[in-house]
Image: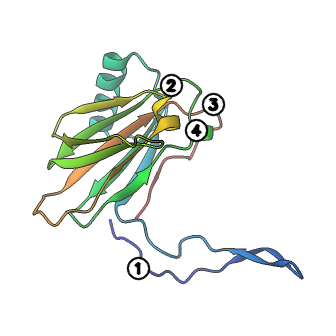
Amino acid sequence: MSQMPLFADASDTVLVDDRLGRIAYTPGVVDVPRLMAHFWLAPEEPRIPGAIRAAAAMVIATTRAPFNSVGLNFYRDGRDSVAAHNDHLDEIVDGSPIALVSLGAVRRMTIRAKKPPRRAMHIDLEAGSLLVMSYETQLHYTHGIPKTRESVGPRISLAFRVKPAREMAGQSAVYG
């Protein structure tokens, strides 16, 4: 799986260009600092690897949440990261949790409160671990995997979510 060059040959979409100013949107200018894939967890989806189905079954049984989507993030080494963020709540069913399964090398996740006092927690996510965040945490905390100069091996994160019902055929994809 190859990753696109840092600066892609992308074209922009002009949203506004008048006497009040110009706004242009250009997708794919800078690559995401990790490799990603996504699968809908539909029973009829033929492209889901058996290991992903098995992990989904374990997470669903453990959390009792009806997860229907899994995003995979491949962190090749300490240079791959994800900035502090909260999940887009319009892409998650109201009240549903987010579950993260870690595979491979241990990486540190930072969870930080959005408002003072900005309490920060640092969790070393071990291989085979499960971190579950309630829907409400996305309103009050950010989470991310910072870059590290420490020598770390590759890691895969499986992020399970309950996404709103929609046409799921052909929606699974590998990005890179």
Which of the two labelled residues, at mark 2 and mark 1, occupies the earlier sequence position? 1
Please tell me which residue is depicted at 35% across the width and 29% down the height of the picture: 132
Whole-number angstrom distance, CA of label 2 to CA of label 4: 10 Å
Which of the two labelled residues, at mark 2 and mark 3, occupies the earlier sequence position? 2
Residue 96 badge:
2
Q: Residue under circle 4?
A: 89
In the displayed image of the protein, which residue is found farthest to the front?
A: 117
Residue 5 badge:
1
SS for dot 4: helix
In the displayed image of the protein, which residue is found farthest to the left?
A: 151
Q: Mark 3 or mark 4: which is in front?
A: 4
Q: Mark 2 or mark 1: which is in front?
A: 2
SS for dot 2: loop
Residue 101 in the image: above or below residue 25 = above
Quadrant of the image occupied by residue 34? bottom left
Whole-number angstrom distance, CA of label 2 to CA of label 3: 13 Å
Which of the two labelled residues, at mark 3 and mark 4, occupies the earlier sequence position? 4
**Residue 63 rendering spot, x and y as whole percentages:** 36, 19
Residue 165 badge:
3
Whole-number angstrom distance, CA of label 3 to CA of label 4: 14 Å
Whole-number angstrom distance, CA of label 4 to CA of label 1: 30 Å
Amino acid type at mark 1: Pro
Please tell me which residue is depicted at 48% across the width and 36% down the height of the picture: 140
Please tell me which residue is depicted at 34% across the width and 70% down the height of the picture: 2
Question: How would you rate the neighbour count of disc 2 (Cα within 10 Å): few for under 14, some for 14-19, many for 20 or more?
Answer: some
Residue 118 in the image: above or below residue 82 = above
Q: Mark 2 or mark 3: which is in front?
A: 2
